[in-house]
Image (cartoon, rainbow, N blue to C red):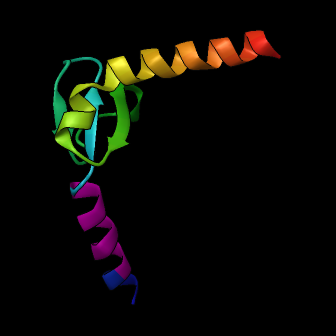
Amino acid sequence: MLLIETHKEQIIEEQEYWFNTKTGQVEQGKQTLAFYRIGPFKTRSEAEHALETLAKRSSDWKEEDQED
């Protein structure tokens, strides 16, 4: 059973996309240290826009904090 669960986790990880902040490239699966990864994202396109997504979320959170 453990082998099956491990295999399922591996398949899921390989279907995830990450943005590598060191190289500026999108990676499929966990290829680099967590320190350099943003994600996971469901699609390559989402990962390609990781920095824009983070900037938008940061701006939204800042606005929410100012409202409180």
Instruction: Give the quadrant of the C terminus.
Output: top right
Q: How many labels sit on residues?
A: 0
Residue at x 27%, y 30% (from the top left corner): 19
Q: Residue furthest front?
A: 67
**Viewer-closest of 23 and 47:** 47
Q: Residue furthest right?
A: 68
**Viewer-closest of 55 and 31:** 55
**Viewer-closest of 34 and 51:** 51
Q: Is 12 inside the magenta-drawn segment? A: yes
Residue at x 29%, y 57% (from the top left corner): 13
Judged left or right of residue 59, residue 5 is left
Q: Above or below — where is 19 with respect to 60?
A: below
* Residue 48, quarter of the rendered image: top left
Q: Above or below — where is 45 with respect to 11?
A: above
Instruction: Give the quadrant of the N terminus.
Output: bottom left
Q: Above or below — where is 46 with respect to 67?
A: below
Report x, y in % for residue 5: 37, 79
Residue at x 39%, y 24% (from the top left corner): 53
Residue at x 32%, y 82% (from the top left corner): 3
Report x, y in % for residue 60: 57, 18
Q: Is 41 inside the magenta-drawn segment? A: no
Q: Residue furthest bottom?
A: 1
Does the magenta stretch mainly form a helix, a strand or a loop? helix
Q: Residue furthest top?
A: 66
Report x, y in % for residue 42: 29, 49
State the extent of the magenta-drawn residues as a range. Answer: 5-14
**Viewer-closest of 60 and 44:** 60
Judged left or right of residue 35, residue 32 is left
